[in-house]
Image: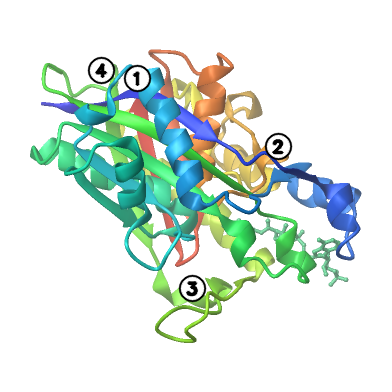
Amino acid sequence: MTRSRLRGTGSALPANVVTNAELAERVDTSDEWIVERTGIRQRYIAEDGETTSTLAIAAARAALDDARIEAGEIDLIVLATATPDNTFPATATKVQHALGCNGCIAFDVAAVCSGFLYALATADSMLQSGMAKRALVIGAETFSRILDWEDRTTCVLFGDGAGAIVIERDDASSSDSADAPGIISTRLHADGAQHDLLYVDGGPSTTQTVGHLRMKGREVFRHAVVNLASVLHEVIEDAGISTDDIDWVVPHQANARILDATARKLGLPAEKIVVTVDQHANTSAASVPLALDTARRDGRIKDGDLVMLEAMGGGFTWGASLIRI
Ligand code: UT7
């Protein structure tokens, strides 16, 4: 029995902070509405020269430093994004070149807000199959570039950023119990029938434009609570643990009310939920690794803790992963 163990985390944010009050000068909204309906107080927005790859590279470097691993020791990079620098090549290859680990496997994964969960599951499987030993798993986005800044129902919700982790196959791991460190269980799902509830109205093969994000927020909200509670139950059952065993939940940061509703459905106390949506807003694939890194660095999440990651996004796609740190 081998397991992929977490060796380090890192994150990066653009320099420019945009508050709700500043947004209220551009569209018909208010700090009060945004805080009450979403919990968001501010977001970071990339400026000229800041791209998905520059944020990803900074987050990856921070994760490598934290793991005390040289870039040359990485043999796999999986980068989750819905806002790549270019349609191709994969943004992961830009990260690879900047880090100097040329030659290793590098590719992008597109599963929007659940992208990091999909990337993590892919990297974990590749480590377990023996294709690689040490992986950088990155979620990086510049959603500000695909927002319709005239549409108050979406433009207030998102921000830019990146998070990264280093995982390593632990060949010495001897136990498959939830007490042993590493990735214990992951479950992923998708439902393409819900395409029209959350999508971008452009793309190379349809309009030859980048397009803008479109969302039926209320319906996405309803599906999110049901789907997340369901996949969390699946992982809890597969791992043979009880909800009480979980030390921290690191959810996708879309809306504080979704976090509350999901926690209530599972019987999890609010104090066990890592919340960063107030500071970062929804950073899509970056949100889970950004929140994980934030909570590790501020001392909330410690070695030995049992941590549940979960996310839901466009597609729909959704998933959860249980990790002993
Ligand atoms: O990351 C992928 C997953 N995404 C999500 O999980 C997002 C899920 N959805 C949500 O978070 C929430 O549905 C929203 C935050 C998007 C919206 O909150 P809501 O409580 O569902 O509001 P609503 O869409 O039902 O809109 C309520 C009212 C509407 O006015 P009327 O029709 O009642 O007069 C909207 O036009 O709020 C209005 N509204 C706003 N008012 C001020 C919508 N956006 C804004 C705004 N400022 N920015």
Q: Secondary structure at mark 3?
A: helix
- Report the disc number at residue 323: none
**269 sits to left or right of 162:** right
Q: What amino acid type should be assigned to the residue bearing mark 3?
A: Gln
Nearer to me, 280 or 204: 204
Of the two numbered discs 3 and 1 on the same chain, state the one appearing first in sequence: 1
Q: Secondary structure at mark 1?
A: helix
Q: What amino acid type should be assigned to the residue bearing mark 1?
A: Ala
- Marks 2 and 3 sit apart, C-alpha to C-alpha, by 29 Å
Q: What amino acid type should be assigned to the residue bearing mark 4?
A: Ala
Q: Which quadrant holds the N terminus? A: top left
Instruction: Count neighbours of disc 4 (C-alpha within 10 A) and say few if under 14, some if 14 to 19, many if 20 or more.
Output: some
- Marks 3 and 1 sit apart, C-alpha to C-alpha, by 39 Å
Of the two numbered discs 2 and 3 on the same chain, state the one appearing first in sequence: 3
Instruction: Count neighbours of disc 1 (C-alpha within 10 A) and say few if under 14, some if 14 to 19, many if 20 or more.
Output: some
Q: Which residue is mark 2?
A: 279
Residue behind label 1 places its C-beta within 8 angstroms of ligand 1: no
- Marks 4 and 3 sit apart, C-alpha to C-alpha, by 37 Å
- Marks 2 and 4 sit apart, C-alpha to C-alpha, by 33 Å
Q: Which residue is mark 1?
A: 67
- Confirm or deny contact between disc 2 and disc 4 (CB under 8 A): no
- Confirm or deny contact between disc 2 and disc 1 (CB under 8 A): no
